[in-house]
Amino acid sequence: MPLASGHRSRVARYQHLSGVSKILGTPVGGRRQQLRRAVPATRFSRGLMPRLPAKNTVMFLLRNAECFAPQPLGRGDVLVALDKIVWLGTELPSLPASLEVEEIDLDGYRLIPGLVDCHAHITGGGGETGGARFRVPRQGLSEFTGGGVTTVVGLLGTDDLTRTTADLVATARGLTEEGITAYCFTGGYHLPATTLTGSVRGDITHIDAIIGVGELALSDHRSSQPTLDELLRIASDAHVAGLMTGKAGLVHLHMGDGRRGLSLVRQALDVAEIPARVYNPTHVNRTKALFDEALELAARGCTVDLTAFPVADEEDAWSAGEALLRYLDADLPLDRVTVSSDGGGCLPTFDEQGNPVSMNVASPAAMADCLAGLLTSGAELERVLPAFTSNVAASLRLPAKGGIEVGADADLVVMDADGRVRDVMAMGRWHVREGRAVRYGTFEGRRVGDGKGHV
Ligand SMILES: [Zn+2]
């Protein structure tokens, strides 16, 4: 589907006369079709060769966007060149007449940074609910982009044995090749940590995609029950590797619902010099008591992560939306709370003896659903949006992510009037237009033997 099919979209050349931009229309798709014909036919006829998209427009001018960066900027225009935001404002500067720019009038729709998901099982999670047939398959590109996620951190959970760090790194690299930005954590629930190079410090230092370690499980019957010294050692490894590389260097901690809660992290903060920011507990909204403990840790300097899993009315848990509003009312640093999807992870329930009772699979779109739910319930976008964007990027030390500003990566989401994902751009390329995916992962939708796919 041509990217310029939207009724408000046009490819234009700019000619500048007396400082006023005059738009000269160019037939949409005309030049693109010529380029498509110029590619040798054999390139598309091999069965396994992914069909490459036609030449991409390299500059987009998004006009009349109600910008939240995530702070509100008001109505304005955003110019994207290749994979970067290069200009924001209301008075379009003069552009060379030879530039080809696709202009899209957003007509007042809200434009927000692409969501940054710090916790997703990009290779699939599960496997602990009664057999290998419950290993969840990997999530496709459009499942992330459909949920407005343009940056994702993949990780291993309970199954850090049949799942490997090598597969995780390759999967992250594949998602990045497909157009979003993907990183990963080394390790998994257990100690000694599953790694690629033989050490957590080596993985973070030597492997570009690896930016921290986790999800290391605490206070959970599936945990390897680390001692305080073991937690300190792995936190030290992550922190030092973070210093050496400029990466996040986080220990992302899966919190179970055990009564020890966050006590081990408190002890670590009490006895060692490792900064609080290194300890990054997730699922802290899974019980109300755990959430209260997490608020105390945020006051001490930890960034705490809320999981956007479904919560029933009678459950002793806060939904991520409810927990976020409670956090924001708690007179704590506003930048130390994030929301993640747990996408691709299984959501099992166990009886008192640890036997699986049921399971579900978390959606990569859970963050977008949570954000839309917050807006529907009357929350102000600028108040809640940092937890989905800039706070996550800051915690992960990704300065080009999570914001709309000059020099930032061109990761953008247009929200519809109901606060749902309407259009998604990742690294300057459209992935979702008017609620529909226009770009898919290499093998998404392919079935063996049908000889075609969506690529
Ligand atoms: Zn977890």
Image (spheres, grey):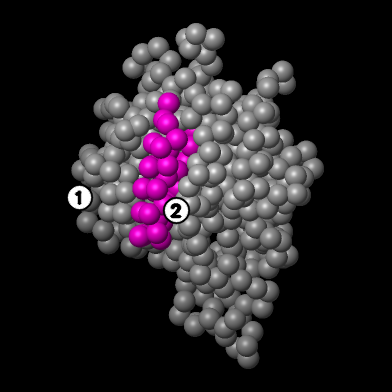
- Which one is in front, 248 or 67? 248
Image quadrant occupied by the C terminus? top left
Q: Give coordinates of residue 147: x percent, y percent.
A: 55, 41
> Against 334, is 12 above or below?
below
Q: In this view, does 255 lie to the left or right of 172?
A: right
> Against 366, is 54 above or below?
below
Q: Give coordinates of residue 380: x percent, y percent.
A: 76, 49
Identify residue for label 1: 42
Give the secondary structure at mark 1: helix
Whichever of callouts 2 and 1 sits on the residue coming sooner in the sequence is 1
> Against 64, is 230 above or below?
above
Q: In this view, does 40 lie to the left or right of 306?
A: left
**Amino acid on which disc 2 is placed:** Ala
- Which one is in front, 376 or 276? 276
Examine the image and state in which quarter residue 73 appears: bottom right
**242 drawn magenta:** yes
Examine the image and state in which quarter residue 19 appears: bottom right
- Which residue corresponds to the image point at 31% horizontal and 54% vertical from the top-left? 205
Give the number of the disc on residue 72. Answer: none
Q: Can you tell me whether the CB of the residue at mark 1 lies under 8 Å from the nearest atom of ligand 1?
A: no
Examine the image and state in which quarter residue 172 appears: top left
Per the rendered image, the range of residues in magenta is 225-254
- Which residue corresponds to the image point at 63% horizontal and 91% vertical from the top-left? 18
